[in-house]
Amino acid sequence: MSQKVLLNAKEINIILHRLACQLIENHNDFTNTVLIGIQPRGKFLANRLAAMLKDDYKIKNVQLGLLDITFFRDDFRRGEKTLEANTTEINFLVEDKKIVFIDDVLYTGRSIRSALTAIQSFGRPHEIELLTLIDRRFSRHLPIQPNYKGRQVDAINNERVKVNWVENEGEDAVYLVNN
Ligand SMILES: O=c1cc[nH]c(=O)[nH]1
């Protein structure tokens, strides 16, 4: 196995500030907007962006939820392992709101398709956007594209993009891993 650094901590920090500013440009004071991190890996990016919007850009109304998609995946019956669900925490109404889904890597698009199904049980949002740190181009199985992206990456099928966060892995970094 070999791995190459795609983004270091400084580059990630710059990208997070850009993404936060792009969100503010489109969502102003976030009165009608909610952020939803897609479990499990989207929660780290979602927490970071929500904290940055509050602390660095003084947005008071940032509402952040977490959405588990485990049993909404189209392949959930295929695996041999018992699946473990993550937490869903949405303590606000999504009816008529603008939702921004947040995930770390956009690959086939199947996780986002599952998230679109899962969110239906919470109401009918006005619109849903997608923000991703890494957009793996040319890997999509579904017609799903991000509205906001940190970095576009061309990776081939036996390569994997690995996103590490200080809170979980002890460092902020993105690697391209070749198995
Ligand atoms: O390369 C990939 C694809 C999906 N999810 C990841 O975390 N990395």
Image (cartoon, grey):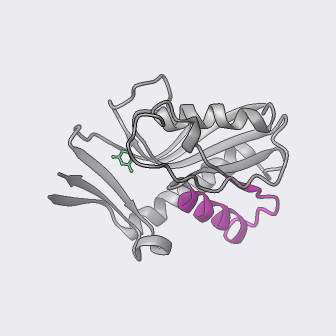
Q: Which residue of the protein is positioned furthest toward the bottom in this rendering?
A: 170
Magenta span includes 53: yes
Left or right, residue 40 beside residue 51 = left
Task: From the top left corner, tell me how far across and down residue 44 is, in percent.
Answer: 54, 62
Residue 17 seen by the camera: no
Magenta extent: 43-66
Magenta span includes 88: no
Q: Determine the residue positioned at 63% across, 37% down.
A: 129
Q: Determine the residue positioned at 63% across, 32% down.
A: 116
For the image, the number of numbered tags is 0
Task: From the top left corner, tell me how far across and down residue 27 is, in percent.
Answer: 74, 45
In the rendered image of this protein, does residue 15 appear above or below residue 136?
below
Q: Nearer the viewer, residue 81 or 55?
A: 81
Task: From the top left corner, tell me how far across and down residue 134 is, in percent.
Answer: 41, 47
Q: Which residue of the protein is positioned furthest toward the left in this rendering?
A: 1
Query: In the picture, which quadrant includes the N terminus?
Result: bottom left
Q: Nearer the viewer, residue 175 or 92?
A: 92
Q: Which quadrant holds residue 89?
A: bottom right
